[in-house]
Image (cartoon, rainbow, N blue to C red):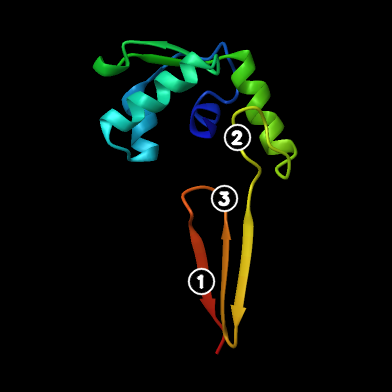
Amino acid sequence: MYTIYILTDGNRFAKPLIKDIINEKLELEDKEIINILEYFKDEGLIDGSNFTTGGSVSITHKGVVEIEAAITIPKERTEHFISQVSMNLFANNIGSIQTGHNNQATTFQNQ
């Protein structure tokens, strides 16, 4: 959802996106991105059609409001998104900070 928000500049009147443009940023399997888009459409967060053949995707007002709420107050959950989780791990000279999506962690070592 955040990727759609960024690609549309949070503007529900922006030119519709092609599914493949969204997937260039996310690098997901085609079936997976179609399922995600169908879910967001069913929840009223996006408008779109023909996701299996490329289709078009537009963010809705509800989608903009929910993403902006998640950005503005990251410690609060929204109707569809959990709050952001941060985890800091430090042992001797090695540290790791995990935050955001995709369970990514940044690891650093102090010499």
Q: Is residue 51 left or right of residue 63?
A: left
Task: Write down the quadrant of residue 75 in the picture.
Answer: top right
Q: Amino acid at mark 2?
A: Phe
Q: What crowding class fits label 1: few (fewer than 14 Cα within 10 Å), some (14-19), or many (20 or more)?
A: few
Q: Earlier in the sequence, mark 1 or mark 2?
A: 2
Q: Which residue is mark 2?
A: 81
Residue at the image point whose x is 71% and y is 31% from the top: 69
The residue carrying mark 3 is 100
Disc 3 versus disc 2: nearer the observer: 2
Q: Mark 3: give few (<14), some (14-19) or many (20+) Cα within 10 Å.
A: few
User: Which amino acid type corresponds to the residue marked 3 in the rendered image?
Assistant: Gly
Which is more toward the observer, 110 or 38? Answer: 38
**Residue 16 falls left or right of residue 2:** left
Which quadrant of the structure image shows residue 111?
bottom right
Do residues under tags 3 and 2 come within 8 Å of each other at their CB atoms?
Answer: no
Q: CA distance from mark 1 to mark 2?
A: 26 Å
- What residue sits 55% from the left and 18% below the top? 45
Tell which circle, 3 or 2, labels the residue nearer the N-terminal end: 2
Note whether 110 is above or below 59 in the view shown.
below
Residue behind mark 1: 107
Alpha carbons under labels 3 and 2: distance apart: 12 Å
Secondary structure of the residue carrying numbered label 1 = strand
Q: Tell me residue 84's x, y (percent).
A: 64, 47
Amino acid type, label 1: Thr
